[in-house]
Image: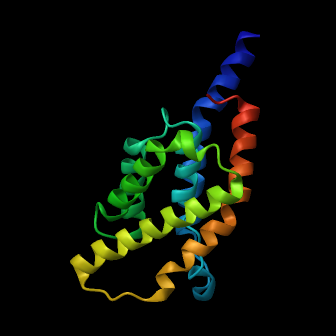
Amino acid sequence: MHQQRLQSMSKRNFSIPFSIVIALVLQIMPMPTIADLYRPDWVLLVLSYWALALPNRVNVGVAFFTGLILDVLLGTSIGVHSFAMCLCIYVLAANHKRLRNYSVWQQSIIIGIIAALYNLVIFWIQHLITDIYFLFDYLWPVASSMVIWPWLFWLLRKVRRQLRIR
């Protein structure tokens, strides 16, 4: 009995970091150029779910370190994704009680706004650093993130409930 309880606690403790690692892998996974244009912001979506569901466990600090890891994996200047991720997760965590009461489809629109903020902050910082110019193609991940959100929400909620993560 004690052994079984330890195993279930182990699964509970590692499920959030494991989901973040899966999101990081999905974010850097090679894709064809045409499909890469529409790649959702997996890390932002997973952190958004956990920040809405468990804001005491996934907060701005987790977003900061995950953003730093994403900066290293993508080869961008250190702090670009980290700052954008912190800003978005702060907005979600500060309003989590209100946002949790919305339907999944309304949350999808909110996630679209947050993903637009994320992508525009990244563009703004990279424009200051490297002098790139805005293309509408930078916003395609916003649309795909909105479409993916309901299914990711239901999947992660099922995992959270089955493992009784609190």
In this view, the residue in front, 80 or 124, is 124
Vertical placement of residue 25 versus 46, above or below: below
User: Which of 8/158 is in front?
Assistant: 158
In the rendered image, is residue 17 in sight? no
> Which residue is depicted at the point 48% across and 49% down?
92
Question: Which quadrant is the N terminus positioned in?
Answer: top right
Is residue 43 rendered to the left or right of residue 133? right
7 over 27 or under it: above or below: above
The x, y position of residue 44, in whole percent, is: 51, 58
Q: Is residue 76 left or right of residue 47?
A: left
Q: Residue at x 65, y 58 (%)?
A: 106
- Of 7 and 95, nearer the camera is 95
Of the 4 image quadrants, the one containing the C terminus is top right
> Residue 149, located in which quarter of the rendered image?
bottom right
Q: Could you tell me residue 20's position as x and y percent?
A: 55, 50
Colouring used for the render:
rainbow
Q: Who's the residue at 42% across and 64% down the image? A: 73
Q: How many marks?
A: 0
Examine the rendering and report whether any part of residue 3 can be seen: yes
* Residue found at the far left of this picture: 129
- Spot occupied by residue 107 in the image (x, y as percentages of width and height): 63, 56
85 with respect to 154 (left or right)? left
Nearer to the camera, 95 or 40:
95
Question: Picture quarter containing residue 82?
Answer: bottom left
At 52% from the left and 50% from the top, the residue drawn is 47
